[in-house]
Amino acid sequence: MPPRIYINDKLCVYCHCSFNRRVSESRRLESPSEYRQRKFCSSRCYHLYNVGENHRNFKNGTKRRKDGYIRTSYDYYIHREIIETLISRRLKRWEVIHHKDNDPSNNSLENLELITHRQHAALHSKYRVRDNQGRFTSESISFRD
């Protein structure tokens, strides 16, 4: 029979209650290495603790999308907030914020421009290549002004 391994109780980071090794449904004890890594008494405490600033992906209350746009923690785009603060009102449905240098993470005031959807579509269509039938292709020209 293998020797017994005694491990002291630990305190949960969230609720501060003491806990010890888990027992699975097949009546096997959690391994000592798994127990040493665990900081919470239950998955409920883990999920309640890992919210907001404690979450591993928290970055100063902002989130960056894969395409580079930055959102606040309540899913509103920062470039829209900047312009709305400048003009002291919410944007209309037909208004769009254009990034002049085509870098969605560059939200400086000099780089942002308030234009309509029509103007924005016309601006971007200038830089797209058309085939011999007038349809847009997946190719594009350099976007620099």
Image (tube, helix red, strand yellow):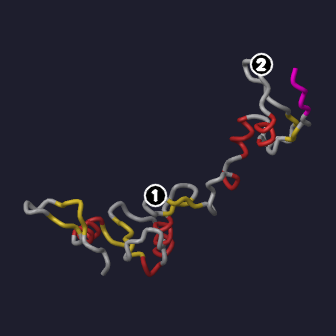
Q: Is mark 2 on a helix, strand or loop?
A: loop
Left-right relation of 95 to 32: left
The amino acid marked with disc number 2 is Arg
* Mark closest to the chain's N terminus, 2 or 1: 2
Q: How far is the residue under mark 2 from the one under mark 1?
A: 44 Å
Q: Where is residue 79 in the image (x, y as percent from the top left)?
A: 47, 68
41, 122: nearer the viewer: 41
Crowd rating for badge 2 (residues with CA inside 10 Å; few <14, some 14–19, many 20+): few
Q: Which residue lies furthest to the top in this view?
A: 26
User: In the image, which disc is placed on residue 27?
Assistant: 2
Q: Where is residue 5 in the image (x, y as percent from the top left)?
A: 89, 31
In which image quadrant can residue 21 be found? top right
> Vertically, is 134 above or below 22?
below
The amino acid marked with disc number 1 is Lys
> Vertically, is 42 above or below 37?
above
Residue 5 among magenta residues: yes
Left-right relation of 29 to 91: right
In which image quadrant can residue 119 be found? bottom left
Q: Which residue is drawn at 46% across and 72% down?
A: 83
Residue pointed to by mark 1: 66
Camera-nearest label, 2 or 1: 2
User: In the image, which disc is placed on residue 44?
Assistant: none
Residue 42 among magenta residues: no
In the rendered structure, which segment of residues is drawn in magenta? 1-6
Q: Residue at x 79, y 26 (%)?
A: 29
Q: Quadrant of the C terminus?
A: bottom left
136, 10: nearer the viewer: 10
